[in-house]
Image (cartoon, rainbow, N blue to C red):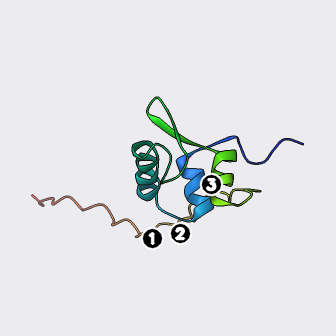
């Protein structure tokens, strides 16, 4: 059975797991890089993307990440309120 949690966790997945905002995670990734790994969350930059190595994060936080909560699906929007169309305007006709 494949591992339900990927080895490299995205910002969105980590945000759902930790229940925190994306901006806080970005700041923790910057902090990790700036302090040489003494503070912040373990992270790796892959081009423009930031990923969190699962095993390093587990070790750093002292937890085992067994599963990541699923993304919330947007709620179905109610049917739009419909107004009955107005009848076509009668043309003004003059009687001769």
Task: From this view, report whether residue 59 is shown above or below residue 2.
Answer: below
Secondary structure of the residue carrying numbered label 1: loop
Q: Can I make out residue 72 in this image?
A: no
Label pair 2/3, CB-CB below 8 angstroms: no
Question: Which quadrant of the rendered structure holds the N terminus?
Answer: top right
Secondary structure of the residue carrying numbered label 3: helix
The one nearer the camera, 81 or 35, is 35
Q: Going 70% across and 46% down the picture, which residue do you hit?
A: 55
Residue 40 position, x and y percent, is 48, 54
Label pair 1/3, CB-CB below 8 angstroms: no
Q: Nearer the viewer, mark 2 or mark 1?
A: 2
The image quadrant of residue 70 is bottom right
Residue 26 position, x and y percent, is 43, 50
Residue corresponding to mark 2: 78
Residue extending farthest top: 47
Q: Residues within 10 Å of mark 2 (few under 14, many from 20)?
A: few
Q: Nearer the viewer, mark 1 or mark 3?
A: 3
Residue corresponding to mark 3: 60
| In this rendering, position of residue 3 left or right of residue 90 | right
Residue 44 position, x and y percent, is 53, 37
Q: Going 46% across and 29% down the picture, which residue do you hit?
A: 47
Q: Residues within 10 Å of mark 3 (few under 14, many from 20)?
A: few
Question: Which quadrant of the rendered structure holds the C terminus?
Answer: bottom left
Q: Nearer the viewer, mark 2 or mark 3?
A: 3
Q: Earlier in the sequence, mark 1 or mark 3?
A: 3
Residue 95 position, x and y percent, is 12, 61
Q: Going 46% across and 61% down the picture, which residue do you hit?
A: 21
Q: Earlier in the sequence, mark 2 or mark 3?
A: 3
Rounded to the nearest angstrom, the CA distance separating label 2 from label 3 is: 45 Å
Residue corresponding to mark 1: 81
């Amino acid at each position: 059975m494949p591992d339900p949690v990927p080895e490299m966790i995205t910002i969105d997945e980590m945000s759902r797991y930790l229940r925190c905002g994306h901006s806080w995670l970005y700041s923790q990734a910057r902090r990790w890089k700036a302090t040489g790994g003494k503070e912040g969350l373990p992270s790796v930059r892959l081009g423009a993307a930031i990923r969190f190595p699962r095993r390093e994060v587990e070790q750093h936080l002292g937890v085992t990440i067994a599963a990541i909560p699923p993304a919330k699906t947007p709620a179905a929007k109610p049917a739009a309120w419909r107004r009955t169309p107005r009848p076509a305007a009668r043309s003004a006709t003059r009687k001769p």
